[in-house]
Image: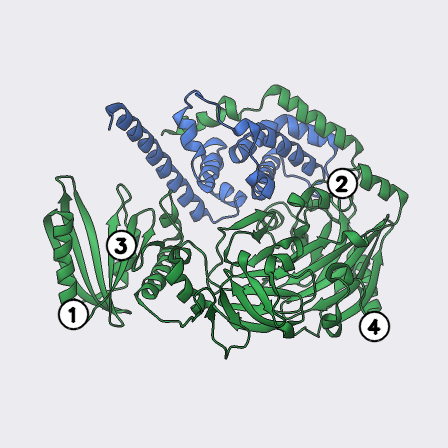
Amino acid sequence: MREKEFKAVFDGEKYVMPQELKYRVKNRISEITATAKPFVKRSVSAMASIILASVLVVTAAAVGGIALFKSIYGENIEPIMPYSEIINTKASDENYELTLHEAVADEYTTAYIFSVKRLTVGVSKAIDNGSTMIFKSFAQVNLNADRFLEYYNSQDNPEYFTTFNGYSTFENQIFAYQQLVLIRPNAAFKEENDAKYLIHAIDNLKTEDTDYYALYVINGENQTLNIGIGTCGSWYGNFSGGPELTLPKMTQKAPSVTRSVQEYYRQYLKQTHPTMLFNGTRLADTVTITPLAVYVKSTGALSSSGMQRAGFMDYINGSLYRSAELVFGDGTEKTLTEMSQDEMGIRISANTGIYLFNEVMDTSQVKSFMVYDTVEFPMDVNLPVIDRETGTEIVPKYEVFDLVFDLGNELVTYLDGMYPEERKEGYKYCGSPRYESENSCTINGHDCMITLTGYELNGETFSAAADRMLQEYFMKYNWAVSNTTIKDGTCSLGNVRYADITASILGGAMTHTHYFFFETGGKLIVLQLNENTNAWPYYSLDALLQLITFK
Amino acid sequence: MADAKFVERAYDLFSGTVYRVCMMYLKNPADAEDAVADIFLKLLSHPKAFNGDDHLKAWLIVAAKNRCKNVLANWWSKTRVEFDSIPEPAAPAEDLTVLAVEELPEKYREALYLYYYEGYTGAEASKMLAITESAFWSRVKRGRELLHMEMEEECDEGKRVQSGI
């Protein structure tokens, strides 16, 4: 393509603004600019006084039983009482009164209940009719009747505020869609921040002029965090500060129970549903149960497959844990989804999912954690993991399957790290190994397809097995071999034999096929690399060869 | 802060450019229309004066880029199906050149656009995209390569169809 052809695209009909559209937009802008009011940015001293006032009130906060959490968890909140606190701090301006009522925490989450009271008639009316008033966006963003909103350290807004147009003063503000804002006054919102922030409207506390919300700060906020209200117009950058409160850190944390699960999961799945191991799903390493939630943690990234994306949040609605249940000491069983708010689990980071309970859990009553209605993990780790369906104990074993699975995942990570952009181009790329058979998987990238296959050596020497298999390939694929280069070497796995074969199949064009035979732990791994047509340079081959020291 | 007259003048001068940028990202006129309106409203509250029309134009392009990326990141725009986007049966063949440019990954398309269409220098464009100049040039280079490759693939595909393979 020539330069003028490229330019012509943007001069074409599709990219030129139609005249009627130009006038229509101009009229829209004129209507709004005619009624626009200048925004007022609150001074630093005014902000400081608001925050200081709220801190002073925290100090004088009443101590006693919490009540508002009953609106979320029901009447039985005894198990969390020792780890909760009444706060009742307030901040207000002429339009709104923001009140932080109560808080409770476990090891990973602090839940706050706060309310926003509309103080003036004008504000109330505007909420009914206007398009820019406080919390209007909640109605707009309450997606699919799911009540959660996520106020997330977004990938989208930071660029806007920091790169170009002079809004760097907003760097420490974690912007909500419209007017509710979380603020880290002492640090940029992206700085060492793994926290997630979820907002949940509490409809059963709502009054004519006051809305109640639960705010969940998950994964720990390591900085001071404020919640504030401001007016924004239609753009994030116009934020002008309104009432603002500091969210206190909770020192008491509700106790949790953690169970290690991964090796049992793998053993069960490789015998029953091996494709599930390879479809991008990462198995949980641990399951942690607290009175407030179940946390599912994995060392690998939880797959986005089986997730329903809403806003910046992934609901776990099709993954492994949809069928997960808790089994109680009295014999009753409840699924995580039925126990959870919105009947959904949420992926809160690349490797953590959470189910926030709709009732407080007495963790001492939980006997075991169960998936697929059959695999039962007792919370007492001294008891065996049982497959109920067969009545057998699940005992983890490291087999050829496991070696292929682990090497496949390590290889994808390695190759993606070496050539992150190039390998992912085009439709052939797959971010995880694909299951082929009980001892084989494939790894696909833009440049090549890799097949990993594992075998037991069964007394045969590594070099004899490699030679035999090469001869078998020649026969099996009926290759007309024009050239074969074989080299021996070593890598971190052990011995390696590398064969570069140039051959014609059924009289077609000459192609290269690369074989790597690895010996590791008494097992033989065969890595076959086929170059994709017109995909040169072959980055993956280059990366593999870098792993080997040839003799 | 800008006044209404300033915004009106800016609109008259640069609405076409802003629309073009929005179309480049959003690819449908309805979303582009909303984005253009929002961007000029945003200009109304811009707190600082601009150093001339070039500065203003650059600001508008970056604001448009960021606005569009926000829209594209939004769940609604990711999951809905526009009625207009449902392909009609027996649609006429589109210009391969336009298709090739549209199928270019966003980062390459925006780099090529700023350099070849808007005529910004590497230093200017890299600042607007918040990347290093060397990264900008590598995007231009890669974008050019990809455009060339995609056109070739299209042609190859056509030849295969014609020859009945």
The amino acid type, in three-letter code, at marker 1 is: Glu
**Viewer-side label of 4, 3:** 4
Can you tell which quarter of the image residue A137 is in? top right
Give the Cα separation between the discs numbered 3 and 2. Answer: 56 Å
Residue at coordinates 74% horizontally, 75% vertically from top-left?
A82
Give the Cα separation between the discs numbered 4 and 2. Answer: 38 Å
Q: Which mark is residue A64?
A: 4
Chain in green colour: A
Q: Circle 2 is placed at which residue position? A: A132
Q: Relative to residue A42, is residue A516 drawn left or right?
A: left
Q: Are marks 2 and 1 on the same chain?
A: yes
Whichever of labels 3 and 2 marks the residue nearer the N terminus, that label is 2
Q: Chain of mark 2?
A: A
Q: Position of residue B161 (x, y in %)?
A: 28, 26
Q: Circle 1 is placed at which residue position? A: A460
The amino acid type, in three-letter code, at marker 3 is: Leu
Q: Are marks 3 and 2 on the same chain?
A: yes
Q: Is residue A173 visible?
A: no
Whichever of labels 2 and 1 marks the residue nearer the N terminus, that label is 2
Q: How is the image coloured?
A: by chain
Q: Mark 4: give few (<14), some (14-19) or many (20+) Cα within 10 Å.
A: few
Q: Is residue A81 above or below residue A344?
A: below
Whichever of labels 1 and 4 marks the residue nearer the N terminus, that label is 4
Give the Cα separation between the discs numbered 1 and 4. Answer: 74 Å
Q: Are marks 1 and 4 on the same chain?
A: yes
Q: Is residue B100 above or below residue A113?
A: above
Q: Is residue B20 visible?
A: yes
Q: Are marks 1 and 3 on the same chain?
A: yes
Give the Cα separation between the discs numbered 2 and 1. Answer: 75 Å
The amino acid type, in three-letter code, at marker 4 is: Gly
- Chain B as rendered: colour: blue
Q: Circle 3 is placed at which residue position? A: A541
